[in-house]
Image (spheres, helix red, strand yellow):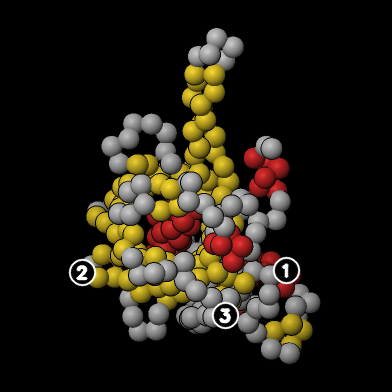
Amino acid sequence: MSSKAETSDRPPSYAEATSRDKTDDILGPVILILAGQAIYAENASTAPLYHLDRGIESLSRATTKVTFERVERIVRTNAQNEPSLRYHRRHVFDLEQTWSLYNLDPMYPVPSNCPRFFARAVSKRALGPVGLKKAFLRSSYKALPVDVDGERDRYGALVFVKDASPLFELCKKGGQWQWTDKDGNAVAIEDQGENTHRLIVTAPLQRESVDSMVALWCCRLWKESAKRLGDPAGGLQGFRRKVQYGKEMRGSVFGGITI
């Protein structure tokens, strides 16, 4: 089956994806480095492990979607039994910034049960959709499934699935973001310097878990970048975006009011 056919099918639910047995696809510890639109394994001279269609560390809130691809290595032999290596990009996630009436006023905070940035699964084996839910008054997040097909809040924002178990937890300790799995085991540490971003995966993980963690890492970096660069809601471009958003949402019901 071609990758096009695979990625065009509807991805499984978060619960279905996390319950499958994938013990035969375990990745060992690795140090990942974000370099522009690519994510490499440290000290590797080969192709990147992941590719983004935009530089995630310099995006503002004007961008709404980023393509996240895993670079797969495929070894084939010819008629003379000579091996050849080629690389194939598999579209795994769309990293998305959600849009709702909250975006019309950048000073109004998005509720904690609504993700601002999240990873929407495109591949059938991806663990998603999933986003980071920030804890109240703490420097920590939980990676939770996002309810993209259910009801939204009264201002049109997507919400997290209620009472769902986290895929990961993320907590800032000693100035570093530390990742743990659903059982509380340490699995990764972020190392951020001047113009450098590294994700140090410290434990063996299933490939789909690594994909999700890297995608969420990118979402968090995007959020930081958007906060640093400010909101582009002003000016003619911002006005046009608001008008377009109003057209898209016309006919939806928010808090009993139809627009």
Residue 14 vs 76, above or below: the answer is below
The picture places residue 159, in percent across and down from the top left corner, at: 58, 76
Q: Mark 1 is on which residue type?
A: Glu
Tell me which corner region of the image, top left, top right, bottom left or bottom right, holds residue 188. Answer: bottom left
Q: Is residue 215 visible?
A: no
Position of the C terminus, as image quadrant, is bottom right
Q: Which residue is the site of mark 1?
A: 248
Residue 181 vs 256, above or below: the answer is above
Q: Is residue 9 visible?
A: yes
Judge the density around disc 3: few (<14), some (14-19), many (≥20) Cα neighbours within 10 Å: few
The picture places residue 231, in percent across and down from the top left corner, at: 47, 68
Q: Nearer the viewer, mark 3 or mark 1?
A: 3
Name the element at disc 3: loop
Residue at 74%, 70% in the rendered image: 247
Q: Which residue is the site of mark 3?
A: 162
In space, the residues marked 2 and 3 are separated at their CA atoms by 31 Å
Q: Which residue is the site of mark 2?
A: 174
The picture places residue 156, in percent across and down from the top left corner, at: 65, 77
